[in-house]
Image (cartoon, rainbow, N blue to C red):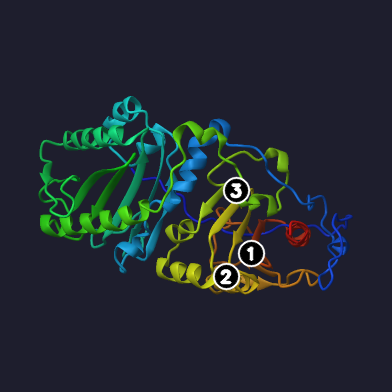
Amino acid sequence: MYMFRFAAAIIVVASVSSCAVAGSAVPGELDVRTLATGSFDVDKHRYTDTAGSAGALVEGVRMAATIAPTVRIDPSLTYGRGDAVLSTVTSALDYVANVSRPILENRKYVTGYATAGADEENAPGAKRPGPTATVVTTSVLRFPDATTATLAARELEDADLGVSPDNRKLPSTKYPAAYLHWRPGIPSIGVFHAYNEFVISGLIQRPRADATDLTQWAEKSLAATLAQLAKFTPTPASNLSTLPVDPGNLLARAVVDKRTDLRPNEDTFAVYPAEHLTNISQDQKLAEETIAATGMDFIGEAGSSTVTRVRDQQGAEKLMQSFLDRSSHYDPMSAPSEVPGAKCLVLNSNGNAEKEYRYRCYVPYKRYLATVRGDKEPEIRQKVAAQYALLANSS
């Protein structure tokens, strides 16, 4: 079973009482000390902690840059199906056969990352596309070294083959070292391929059970992933605990309820490369175009806030407009007039109040776009003001 995380709704909360704001006036800019920011911290801050015992998770988040979004495999695969950080053996077993646990444990599995995309949306009432769809799922699994990864790839293939006596190997002329297999009559193919200290694991579903067609798609997927993986510099396994939790001080620019409560977490305290946005997007083509147009490079998730770094102020405003244009389940609402450029939305009847925040607000500042979320309108105004103040104070 494949377990993916999808983009969460981005909303904001703020209160109306005023509070003194740290900082100083900058010529030509709003004096943020005049803003009503409530109890939110808005002073310049740094998270100086290193990953410690969460090193595998922090490296797994970095590995979002190891897999090409599916739209790069084939332009038809525009529907992102989410992503997942595989920082434990248990989480990795969502992407390989359960009988593979001893292999991962014996070969000292380090960490990994997975994502998927399709050429169709999920079937009505279903959690995945129907049988007419092409779906490509790819995970990159890391091991201590290249020798171990090579052994693990072969053993993972043998374990997968052993799941059914009907499974058969398939050759690849383009990647003769890769392991491919299928079950005749079933329109899917499994792939394992070692590259340096990594094992690429893939599962591809097609509308028809054609071995030649499935092999061609496996090779297309491998080509895209290998090209992406070649650009990635892994952290030495012995240094994972020393990874900074906030490279570039991106998380420190996000307004949060309590700074002291935050620990590395793939959803609520992590810095992702830009590929993360594409992988979770329901329109990967548009996401790729937006990344290129805005110069986006990193996305910081902190609590219920997000701060995205782009090329410049124009890029931040362009990214904000792209998000606004794709918010059909939100309606515009007034943003605090004292916060330059801020835009706010409120969930409408097309949204899901159980899964999405009621309010979502965007705050652009220089090369950053912050998104704040919440469910109480009084608090949202404070949070928007606090986010602007924090961005200004962090410059």
Residue 247 shows which numbered tag?
3
The image shows residue 243 at horizontal and vertical percentages of 55, 39
Quadrant of the drawing holding the C terminus: bottom right
> Which one is in front, 179 or 203?
179
Q: Amino acid at mark 3?
A: Pro
Residue 279, placed above or below residue 285? above
The image shows residue 23 at horizontal and vertical percentages of 84, 57
Q: Amino acid at mark 2?
A: Leu
Quick one: label 3, few (<14), some, or many (20+) residues within 10 Å?
Answer: some
Q: Quadrant of residue 361?
A: bottom right
Residue 173 shows which numbered tag?
none
> Which one is in front, 225 or 10?
225
Where does label 2 land, which residue? 319
Quadrant of the drawing holding the N terminus: top left
Disc on the earlier residue, 2 or 1: 2
Where does label 1 land, which residue? 369
* Residue at left offset 31%, top offset 37%: 146
The image shows residue 364 at horizontal and vertical percentages of 67, 67
Q: Quadrant of residue 148?
A: top left
Quick one: label 2, few (<14), some, or many (20+) residues within 10 Å?
Answer: many
* Residue at left offset 53%, top offset 67%: 295
Whether label 2 touches label 3, CB < 8 Å:
no
Disc on the earlier residue, 1 or 3: 3
Q: In the drawing, does residue 293 fall left or right of residue 156?
A: right
Q: In the drawing, does residue 32 fall left or right of residue 233?
A: right
Q: Amino acid at mark 1?
A: Leu
> What is the C-alpha distance between the residues marked 2 and 1?
8 Å
